Image (cartoon, rainbow, N blue to C red):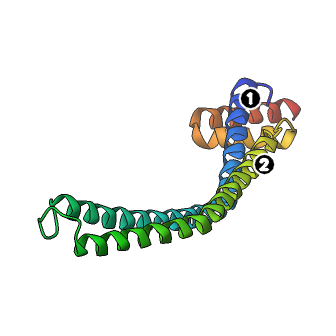
Amino acid sequence: LKLFESEINAEIGMMQQETYRAQDNLLKERYSEEIAIVKGEINILRTQLNTADSVRTSLLNNAIGEADGTSGTKVRNMGSIYKMKSSAATKADQEYKILAATITPKLTEQQAKLADVEKRRQTDLNKLTRASLTGFASRLKALHRLSISEASIKWAGWFISLLFLLIEC
């Protein structure tokens, strides 16, 4: 182990990085489902709000187009058709305001929930520590990994072991 100390230390550094990366991936997986659910709910709420807003805008544009003669009957006046379109636009605007009043608190709540989940995930991520792989077993494991990946270290280890065996005999 002492002969290959620098190579073993480099391999231990790689093993520590792999352990940290595995812990980081497990932590991200643990929170990913919860984050996806909250983001999905936020998207649903935003879609509902955007849909109501587009309906409101469309009806308002139809009423304005009827009044200035650019759409609808193509007659510039504020007659009965304009009044019908204007009342529909007003009704859609009121519905949008009611919907916005109910959705906005829910949206704010979901965004706060998402921020809380992200904060918990970040806190747990900051708590992760690098694995301390400085023991004898870790050094043996590093030497084993090195001997698998590089044949020269494998054979050098065998010859050194054989040399010590001969000396002891």
Q: Residue at x 73, y 27 (%)?
A: 4
| Residue sitting nearer the eye, 79 or 66 | 79
Label 2 or label 1, whichever lies nearer to me, is 2
Compared to 50, does 2 lie above or below?
above
Near-viewer residue (130 or 99) = 99
Q: Residue furthest left?
A: 74
Please provide percent x and percent y for residue 107.
61, 61
Figure quadrant of the C terminus: top right
Residue type, numbered disc 2 = Asp
Instruction: Name the residue tied to disc 2.
Output: 124
| Tag 2 secondary structure | helix
List x then y, in percent, for residue 117.
Answer: 72, 55
Q: Earlier in the sequence, mark 2 or mark 1?
A: 1
- Can residue 143 be seen from the camera position used here? no
Residue displayed at 78% across by 48% down: 124
Give the percent coordinates (x, y) of residue 93.
44, 66
Give me the residue at 61% from left, 44% from top.
Answer: 148
**Quarter in which the N terminus is drawn:** top right
Residue 108 visible (yes or no)? yes
Q: CA distance from mark 2 to mark 1?
A: 28 Å
Can you tell which quarter of the image residue 73 is in? bottom left
**Label at residue 9:** 1
Q: Residues within 10 Å of mark 2 (few under 14, many from 20)?
A: few
137 horizontally vs 116: left or right: right
Check disc 1 and report its element: helix, strand or loop. Answer: helix
Along the line of sight, the residue nearer the viewer: 65 or 139: 65
Amino acid carrying label 1: it is Asn
- Neighbours of disc 1 within 10 Å: few (<14), some (14-19), many (20+): some
Question: Residue at position x 41%, y 67% from top?
Answer: 51
Viewer-closest of 70 and 41? 70
